[in-house]
């Protein structure tokens, strides 16, 4: 880090700690030339996942939209909200692992189905039937794009 006092490019970190909410790392640095101290903050870069729709348009991954689909499939099933949230988090993670952080809309449905299959047969069948309908409609050339 360039020293804000003398412009020298080398320093040593004398202290490093997380901010109270853990959203950043605060570092105290000491310039190796003038010896003055300064502070830097390191933040996580917000990564937005993009969903590629059938017509090639991209839109940000919408957790709420996916959750609505899962909730519908899980209606009156012994599946907690926490579990449903967990499914989405897992789906998000597997998209994040991809270097381009983009996913084809239909792939999200497949990922959710995989998770539901392990969790609850009824919810899985429900979700799968909605998903297949959506796929058939998409196959007819209509842009549904979203999983509802
Ligand atoms: Zn300096």
Image: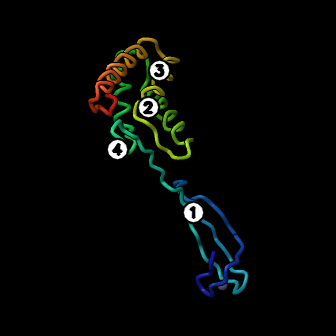
x, y percent for residue 98: 55, 42
Could you say which is closer to the camera, residue 135 or residue 34?
135
**Residue drawn at 62 percent across, 85 percent down:** 7
Q: Secondary structure at mark 4?
A: loop
x, y percent for residue 21: 51, 54
Q: Which residue is mark 4?
A: 57
N-terminal label among 1 and 2: 1
Could you say which is closer to the camera, residue 74 or residue 23?
74
As displayed, is residue 14 above or below residue 112?
Answer: below
- Are the residues tagged 2 and 3 within 8 Å (C-beta)? no
Q: CA distance from mark 4 to mark 1?
A: 33 Å
Q: Secondary structure at mark 3?
A: helix
Tell me if 103 is positioned left or right of 18 in this view.
left
Q: CA distance from mark 4 to mark 2?
A: 16 Å
Q: Nearer the viewer, mark 2 or mark 3?
A: 2
Q: Which residue is mark 2?
A: 108
Q: CA distance from mark 1 to mark 2?
A: 32 Å
Q: Which mark is residue 116?
A: 3
N-terminal label among 4 and 3: 4
Q: CA distance from mark 4 to mark 3?
A: 28 Å
Within-10-Å neighbours for mark 4: few <14, some 14–19, many 20+: few
């Amino acid at each position: 880090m360039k020293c804000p006092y003398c412009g020298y490019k080398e320093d040593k970190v004398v202290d490093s700690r997380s901010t109270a909410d853990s959203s950043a790392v605060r570092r105290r640095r000491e310039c190796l030339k003038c010896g003055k101290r300064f502070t830097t903050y390191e933040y996580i870069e917000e990564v937005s996942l993009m969903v590629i729709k059938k017509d090639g348009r991209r839109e940000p991954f919408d957790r709420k939209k996916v959750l609505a689909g899962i909730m519908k499939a899980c209606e009156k099933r012994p599946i907690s909200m926490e579990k449903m949230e967990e499914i989405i988090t897992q789906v998000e993670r597997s998209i994040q692992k991809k270097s381009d952080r983009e996913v084809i809309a239909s792939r999200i449905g497949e990922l959710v189905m995989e998770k539901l299959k392990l969790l609850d047969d009824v919810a899985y069948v429900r979700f799968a039937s909605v998903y297949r309908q959506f796929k058939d409609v998409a196959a007819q050339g209509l842009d549904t794009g979203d999983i509802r």
